[in-house]
Image (spheres, rainbow, N blue to C red):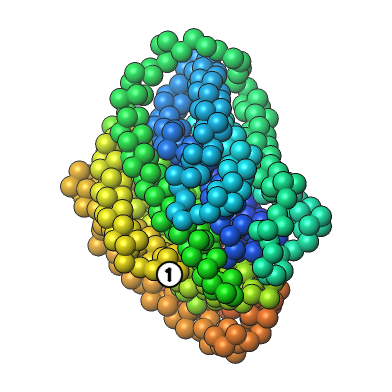
Amino acid sequence: MSAPTDARGRSKAVALMASGTMVSRVLGFARTALLAVAIGSTTAVADIFEKANVIPTIIFMLLAGGIFNVVLVPQLIKASQAADRGSAYTSKLITLTVVVMAAATVLLTLLAGPIIQALSSGWTEQQIALGTAFAYWCMPQVFFYGVYAVVGQALNAHGRFGAYMWAPVLNNVVQIGVIGAYIFLFSAYRANGQQFETWTSQQTWLLAGGSTLGIALQALVLFIPLMRTGLHIRPDFGWRGMGLRHVGRIAIWTLASMTVGNVASLIYGRIVSGATAARAQLPDGGASVPGEYALNTSQLITVLPHSIFALSLATVLFNELSSHFAKKERHLIAPALSRGLKTTAVPILFATVAFIVLAGPVGRIFGGTSDTAVESGAAIGQLLLLTTLGLPFKSVHFFLIRVFYAEEDTKTPMIIQTSIAVIGLIAAFIMAATVPPLHIAFAMALLFGITNILSAIIAHVLVVRRYGDYGVASVLDAYLRIGWIAVFSGVVGALVLFALGGFTFGFAWQSIFTAILSICIVGVVMAVVYVLLLKRSRVPELDEFLGPLARRIPNFASGKRSRR
């Protein structure tokens, strides 16, 4: 296959994945904003539901997430080269996943109460009881996450990237419908101080059960495109000869890495949960005090550009790197990595500056509609500012460790993950002992940004030590050139936002609608300034990022020809 054809194939795959992720994330934002309308964003019920709903995700990643998402991809790619295109191997793998994840889910559901109690700090008996009830309904998500991951990776191994990225759209549509039904039946949160006392079991099963229903459909819908691949999938318990021993040797380091990282996440959540108990002691309800829901929401917002652009580019790059290693084309590793890092700088640096400028209005979207919505939105906005600091480094780290995974080296990422987890946990325990619970979420948000920076630095040092210079100077130069343009567009955007009352609790803060309108106006202005300056400066990474679009729009195309 020719290089241009490869490039077009990469661009199409990235575009398909990015579009699916973008739609899913936008719907995820709508779901989160709607949930804040339903139960608030800085309330006890919001924090309790958030913990119960997030625990299954973390536990899945703790049990097997890294194995599914990283270790098995090279194995599935190798199996796809067999005469049956990997049908037998994929059947065995899906069967094994169903059996193991089903057993784990049953056990975890039975332990829901002790798990909630162990992962909360200072909660009352009533709060633990509600958390346990939520967890009973949410814990089955572990099983469906496993099915979603293994089927999705089987599709990726056969070049069907789109379905894996588009399936979460169905999940978000279902959950938006469930939350809409909740608001219709039980009305929106009104900050009257009676939310916890008047909570009913019907509210519990509708919210938590609806969340699990969305995850289940997200997993099951992937079997449709899997059947269309032509693979003959059937239950197969003949697990001998699958190479599990080889995979196990690889996976042990990944599992150790995921264990350390996700145990750290659980501990972080436990520390932040102290804000839920402390908030209840305040006479005004503590709407300006963020807890676990607000902190996770800020991270959800920050990770959006990473998920849309960096994750999509890195997924395709990972298969490319795996192929280079398999063919012993080590000389092609550095150029591929350098290209990926520089290309992702275009959207990631713009997003970083945009989040800094628009933190207030973005937070307001997730503040809800109650009388305390502005206070809640301001709290989320402050968290967003802190978590945004590490965004570019998060994407850089993600690209760098993909090189190790592509070579089936899972030990080095484990070392990186463990180092960061140890540093983070030491800092978190110090914060827990010195920072008042009312401010602990802010401290944790800052910590997350700092650990992202450290992760990128450590990964860079180890990549250079193993594979040599991957064009670090040119990558740094690209980030600096693009970064200054992003900053200038941010200054222009800040002036527009100031006129809209974004820094004085004016128009941009009046409602969710005015916040969205302000974000759209400022965002469009910033994007136009950004792209025009990139074109004016003839930044080559812009054409690489835009891909097919740059070849179809006359102005972009002519600009590209003029540099030849």
* Residue 252 visible within the image: yes
User: Height in image: 305 above or below 82?
Assistant: below
Residue on which the image places disc 1: 439
**Which residue shows up at 31% across the image and 57% down it?**
429
> Is residue 247 shown left or right of residue 127?
left
Local packing at callout 1 (Cα closer than 10 Å; few below 14, some 14-19, many 20+) is: some
Residue 151 image position (x, y, % from top left): 56, 30
Residue 45 to residue 262: above or below: below
The C terminus lies in quadrant: bottom left
The residue at the point 63 percent across, 81 percent down is 508
The residue most toward the left is 465
From the viewer's perspective, tell me whether residue 108 is left or right of residue 404: right
Which quadrant of the figure has residue 321? Answer: top left
| 347 or 216: nearer the viewer | 216
Instruction: Work out whether residue 125 or residue 352 is closer to the camera in this orientation and state it.
Output: 125
Q: Is residue 547 visible?
A: no
Give me the residue at 31% from left, 50% from top. Answer: 421
**Kind of element beneath mark 1:** helix
In the image, taking residue 379 as reference, residue 256 lies left or right, namely: left
Compared to residue 510, the image places residue 398 above or below, namely: above
**Residue 77: quadrant of the picture:** top left
Residue extending farthest front = 125
Q: Residue at x 53, y 23 (%)?
A: 103
Q: Amino acid at mark 1?
A: His
